[in-house]
Image (cartoon, rainbow, N blue to C red):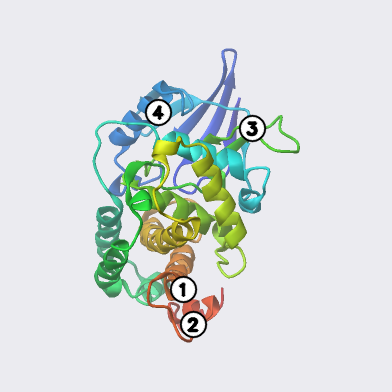
Amino acid sequence: LVSHVSGGITNVLHKVKGEAGEVLVRLYGENTDMLIDRDEENRILAELSKAGFAPGFLGKFETGRLEEFLPYRPLQPAEMSHPDFIPAISKELLRLHSLSIPPVKGPGLIPAIMKFWRVACSCEFSGRKAEEVGCLRLDEVPEEMKLFEAELEAVSPFMREVVFSHKDLLAGNILVPLSHESGVVEKVQIIDYEYSEWDFRGFDFGNHFAEHAGFDCDYEQAYPSHETKKAFIEGYLNGMSPDQLPKDTPIEKLISDADLFAVASHMYWGLWAIVQARYSPIDFDFMNFARQRLAGYHYHKQFFFSEKAEHPKTLSQIYSTLAPPSHTTE
């Protein structure tokens, strides 16, 4: 018995049920190997599975792989800021960051963004999509990354430390047991490691905060509150031993550092989405998502870079500047 598993916009997922039990069949998205090293991803999954962090890795084939199927459900974006889930998510993220998955290297953030940018610039579009991508100001990306690298110099050593990172901690990649009905969840399962690598600790925080808005990308309303961000970071720190805790770094500084990495996450996924708009057969408006994420970049940059905007623009105003004249509303 084969049934489709919804939620992913990179791969196609199916649950296969037979006499021996249930397995998850992951079919790689078309041309996703342009951005994802599938051999490296499989190696990482095997390492994480061996370490007891990831679901079981059961085998691979040319266009996908087999994984252990878990009787879990994905979170909804609004649940990520709920007190019942914050402690378990932050605890599991710390567990991932504490693993030493060989080989140790990185940080991979800036090289990955520039790779996505080069591939995005090489994509050929026609008609309406060509007009849309022409409004996304791709020529500005190298200079924007220089500005971001300059901002990194003021980031705390703790958030700048290179750890093994997930890099895609959105609601759909955080699972809770189907048996959980209410109250504080004891443990969550983090899945999907296509983009995992050694990177700045802070990126997983900032990216996770940006993902609170889900695919609606309403960063004015759904970006987590100061209290939610504080609770998440404190939950993470509570799992550390005294000698691991950041020295002489107040929680407010850690929050502002995480916010800076949220800006970078918008650029990362905005460029990624342009490539998906060119090649992915999945029924999803990747070009609009690219515009939403790049609008998020320019919107949050006004508040989270060291030089704050005196007269910040609304998210809608910025979105409009990245859209063709006839497509100026979200």
Q: CA distance from mark 4 to mark 2?
A: 43 Å
Label 4 sits on residue: 48
Disc number lying in front (4 or 2): 2
Label 1 sits on residue: 303
Residue 326, position in %: x, y? 50, 83
Q: CA distance from mark 3 to mark 1?
A: 35 Å
In the rendered structure, which disc, 1 or 2, sits on the residue that comes first in sequence?
1
| Residue 219 image-quadrant placement | bottom right
Label 3 sits on residue: 186
The amino acid pointed to by label 2 is: Pro
In the rendered structure, which disc, 1 or 4, sits on the residue that comes first in sequence?
4
Towards the viewer: 59 or 266: 266
Q: CA distance from mark 1 to mark 2?
A: 8 Å
Whether label 1 touches label 2, CB < 8 Å: yes
Q: Residues within 10 Å of mark 1 (few under 14, many from 20)?
A: some
Whether label 2 touches label 3, CB < 8 Å: no
Label 2 sits on residue: 312
In the rendered structure, which disc, 4 or 2, sits on the residue that comes first in sequence?
4
Q: CA distance from mark 1 to mark 4?
A: 36 Å
Towards the viewer: 40 or 203: 203
Residue 144, position in %: x, y? 30, 71
Q: Quadrant of the C terminus?
A: bottom right
Please, what secondary structure does the residue beneath circle 3 have? loop
Q: CA distance from mark 2 to mark 3?
A: 41 Å
Residue 139, position in %: x, y? 27, 74
The amino acid pointed to by label 3 is: Glu
Q: Residues within 10 Å of mark 4 (few under 14, many from 20)?
A: many
In the rendered structure, which disc, 3 or 4, sits on the residue that comes first in sequence?
4
